[in-house]
Image (cartoon, grey):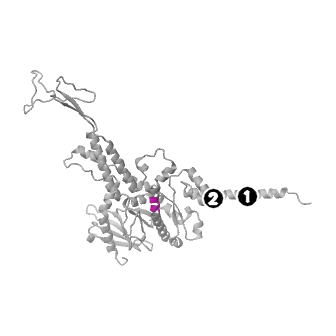
Amino acid sequence: MASLGPLTLAQQLLAILHRDGGRLAQIDAYLHGRHADPYMPPMADDEYRLLAKRAVSNWMPLLVGTPAQALYVDGYRAGADATAASQPDSATPEWEHWQRSRLDARQAAVYRGALAFGHAFTVTEKGRSGAIVTKGLSALKTAALYEDPANDDTPAAALTVTAWPKDEQPGRARLWDTRREYKVSFLSLSDEKSVRVRGSVLHGAQECPVTRFAASVDLEGRTLGVIEPMIALQDRINQTVFDLLLAQTYGSTKVRTVSGMAPPVQRDSETGEPVLDELGNPIPLQINHNSRRFLFAEDPDVRFGSLDETPLAGFIESIDMSVRHLSAIAQVPPHAMLGQIANLSAEALQAAEVSLSRMIAEFRTSFGESWERVFRLAAELAGNASSADDFRGEVVWRDMESRSLAHAADALGKLREQLGIPERGLWRRVPGVTQTELEDWEQMREDDDSVAQLSTALTRATADRSVPEAA
């Protein structure tokens, strides 16, 4: 693949976007609530179609947001040499690059894109001011080529569309290979002959500066997100909700019936004779009948009755069952989807979230490797050779598990007393602690140690002066 020219690479990458465009567009539509209509009769009227529109119950954002909200990089520990390791985590060049790229806020978009579509991308490059920045790239507009897509973390080439073709104006894209960046124009993703490549410049790295964030990759190199496997189940829920709305609209109230009674008809005000229509039939009067009015008849042969309403409990139970199936397959706790959280202790919540915690741990492992490559790329572009070759560094994920502070404090105290773990090594285990707070604690501890040493020295000097000299 290294021998392929930029034009061939651009054509292949645009072909990948064309091939995957329909599937990714469907995932994007379901993420934003544009679902397939539930089944309805071919001659359905506007009321049916309105109910079908209201039947959409979009669970997809919850399936993406629940694990994404537990993914938050809070620091980076370098492992290249003792000098880098002795610095505070927020003072390392890697973390300065993170803050300059505003990834505290922008990292969430990368995770949500990777969880929704199966993969997302970032590009690390020098900005106009010369600073090294990293920004996210959408899977809908970006594709990458790998020698071994299942095992390689470095793409041979990558392309992202910056403008789609519109009004006979060609689309524009950026192409990166191992050394250079190119400008690409095209008229259509499927028209290879319209692809043009021009304007190459060195991007400054020794490998492609695009990094893939994959939620799940199989040995064939295929990525899979959390939405695509749930589309069929989401359609089932929408169909059941649609059936519920139909039963609720047309059959949820009792129907009053009457037989053997002729309706009153319109009569001429002067003659009293019935008013006839074009066919010679009497025109009936409209009856204003509701729950506050009663019908009565003088004829003893008239019979009144009622038709029972359609029970809705079965539809509601079916919806709950489908949501529970969705919860089990997506590894999202039922209480997070159904809102049933009453009388649950912290231990019960933790037990209910075991499956979710395991899935989040898998995502952290995959995304953490990708962030470490981003840091190495940023260091290489900045000319920091030691950090560029640092394969022992690791990102620090914020602890987002649902544990009470008292429970965590008790567990950490036992670890220190029974296992002898240094207390500073347990600080990172405190729920909700940030990297800045850890560094503040370190500084406070050093200040306290200095004051304690000074106080001890003064106490000893005072004691030495108070001891009388030997006779």
Q: Nearer the viewer, residue 455 or 338?
A: 338
**Residue kind at label 2, given as amino acid type:** Gln
Which residue is painted at 19% across and 49% down in the image? Answer: 42
- Residue 362 lies within the magenta run: yes
Identify the image quadrant of residue 273: top left
Which residue is disc 2 drawn over? 418
* Residue 176 seen in this snapshot: no
Quarter placement of the C terminus:
bottom right
Which residue is painted at 43% across and 73% down in the image? Answer: 207
> In the rendering, at what x and y percent does residue 108 appear?
44, 57
The CA distance from mark 1 to mark 2 is 32 Å
Which residue is disc 1 drawn over? 454
In magenta, the rendered stretch is 358-364
Which residue is painted at 59% across and 69% down in the image? Answer: 83
Q: Nearer the viewer, residue 248 or 265?
A: 248
> In the rendering, at what x and y percent does residue 439 appear?
59, 58
**Residue kind at label 1, given as amino acid type:** Leu
Q: Residues within 10 Å of mark 1 (few under 14, many from 20)?
A: few
Q: Nearer the viewer, residue 362 or 25?
A: 362
- Residue 292 lies within the magenta run: no
Quarter placement of the N terminus:
bottom left
Q: Residues within 10 Å of mark 2 (few under 14, many from 20)?
A: few
> In the rendering, at what x and y percent does residue 276 appear?
9, 29
